[in-house]
Amino acid sequence: MNYNLNQISGKEEKKSTFAVLKKLLQLISDERRNLLFAFVAIVINSTLLLLSPLIIGHTIDTYISTKQYEGVLLYSCLLFVMFLVTLATGYLQTKLMGGVGQRTLYALRNAIFSKLQELPVSFFSQNKAGDLISRVNNDTDKLNQFFSQSLMQFLSSIFTMLGSGIFLLLINFKLGAATLTPAMFILLFTALVSAWVKSKNALNLKSVGNLSAGIQESLNNFKVIIAFNRRDYFRKRFDETNQQNYRTAIGAGIANTIFIPVFGLFSSLAQLVVLIYGIHLIAIGEFTIGLLISYLSYAVNFYNPLRQLAALWSSFQVALAAWDRISQILSLENDLQVITDSTEKTSDALLSFRNVHFSYAGSQEILHNISFELQKGKTYAFIGPTGGGKTTTASLMARLYDTTKGTVLLNGKDIRSYTAAERSNKIGFILQEPFLFTGTVKDNILYSNKAYADYSNAQLEQVIKEAHLEGILALFDKGLETEIASNSDSISLGQKQLIAFMRAVLRNPELLILDEATANIDTVTEQLLSDILKKLPKETTLVIIAHRLNTIENADEIYFVNSGEVIKAGTLAHAIDMLLKGKRSS
Ligand SMILES: Nc1ncnc2c1ncn2[C@@H]1O[C@H](COP(=O)(O)OP(=O)(O)OP(=O)(O)O)[C@@H](O)[C@H]1O
């Protein structure tokens, strides 16, 4: 399956704004109560705002022109109370929406992170970590900004605008229609350029992702950069990505501000129409001065929110572009689904490959029509030249990937019929470059091993002793409490491999795969590991992938992996011969 997010984006962008908006609203459905309160606050706020011009007009026509000052005082007090209520509802709305924004951000980041945990290995090999980090951090924050700062303003503006529009038409339909005509041009313009604004923002978010990926790559590889004195190379590459980000940011900035002058121009035109046409109506006796002042206020109340909408609409387009990038991740499914295999158990072997073909996404076939069986309790060695396909074969044994064609059977049943938990209980996989977490040796060897999760150090040391692993633990100064910092130099690659070895052995798997697991370990320690392997339960099947041939001397069977084929090599001498010739023989 193609998991490359930057290739999926083309399809995703075609999604209608409405469909994306629907998804967005689903996300905030838990916040219904707060949203309702905030909405009520907006309605009160906007209604008061809409009523005030009417009261001002009425006061001018009824009390000021007739010099009845008690009436002026009364209505001034009423207006003052209305402004106080507006202040309170405005504050309430901002407070409620700030909380909604932060909680949505929290829920969204959790949702993305959980989804990332569910996705298969191929997703991570097709996407850059830096870009994923940018989606989790930066893009979610863009959505938060929209929720906490813009959404209610957006609704409030629309509400005030609609109310003012209705008042404008009710007071004088002809004048109202003339006043609202410029708004039609604004709507047309908005409809025409919105997609362009969104695409400019999408480009900018993508380049922020690339920038983050660039930084991540150079930080991860700083030793190589320094060793080869290639700081200039990375500086140049970073500069290019940074420049691209600068250009897309300028593009997005221009796109985001394009609404403001256009909206402003048409708003001013509308006020001009009201003034000229309104004065004409007063001249022919169809209108009063008080009504014209109210009318102008409604026109301002209609066009001011529209001006605000210009800025808010850009923020909405940024949020939509960010949401597209986030929903690309959220809509992905793990293609390694669990299937039901109701066929009869067809083999006694622990693991069988039946006519297996495999290729990585978008690349040529790595394994062609492979069939072999691994019996319980036996030790198998897989050897072959670099890039021959050994790790790929082992990855299929642990179902890190699915075959392109053919079947892998575990205990006679399709490996796809086991859940991830069942599979990882049965199969221990020590990778070429084991990953350790920040914590202690204990945290790392107990990783995902619930059986010993509550054990004290003394109890765990006993278990380690029973598994004959105490010799390895003794190699760490502070034993189980030795601190490990992920990605740090506090621990060597060989030591990492030792911890990964303890982690896998303690799980007591039926199949233990060691992929170059001793490549960075000295000969004495390697002998120690070899002794431990000999003491594993006799039904444990071992798969050893190794370049150092002394590690496979005791294998029951040797397979030679090269050019898409996995074939029996027979004796060690024959295997060495094949390695030296770099080609297969039968
Ligand atoms: N994630 C991947 N995506 C695409 N191609 C890959 C991927 N991983 C490995 N390959 C390709 O598959 C082929 C077999 O690689 P594999 O890692 O299985 O070889 P190997 O025999 O284990 O090599 P080594 O001895 O160096 O570990 C290589 O050509 C490699 O470039």
Image (tube, helix red, strand yellow):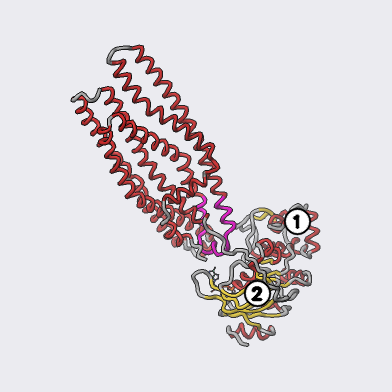
- Name the disc covering residue 530, or none: none
Q: From the viewer's side, name the closer residue of 527 and 535.
A: 535
Question: For numbered disc 1, what is the local secondary structure?
Answer: helix
Look at the image and say whether residue 285 sits in the magenta stretch. no
Judge left or right: residue 428 versus residue 562: right
| Residue 266 picture location, percent across and down | 27, 39
What residue did someone put label 2 on? Answer: 546
Name above or below for residue 297 compared with residue 452.
above
What residue did someone put label 1 on? Answer: 452
| Residue 395 picture location, percent across and down | 61, 69
Q: From the viewer's side, name the closer residue of 130 and 177.
A: 177
| Residue 26 picture location, percent across and down | 51, 47
Judge left or right: residue 32 versus residue 407: left
Name above or below for residue 466 compared with residue 347.
above
Name above or below for residue 133 compared with residue 384.
above
Q: Residue drawn at (71%, 79%), measured in percent from left and top?
A: 553
Q: Is residue 12 visible?
A: yes
Look at the image and say whether residue 115 sits in the magenta stretch. yes
Counting labels gives 2
Tell me the kind of residue under disc 2.
Ala
Tell me the kind of residue under disc 1.
Tyr
Name above or below for residue 564 compared with residue 468.
below
Q: Please state the extent of the stretch shown in magenta in the rendering.
A: 111-136
Badge 2 or badge 1: first in the primary sequence = 1
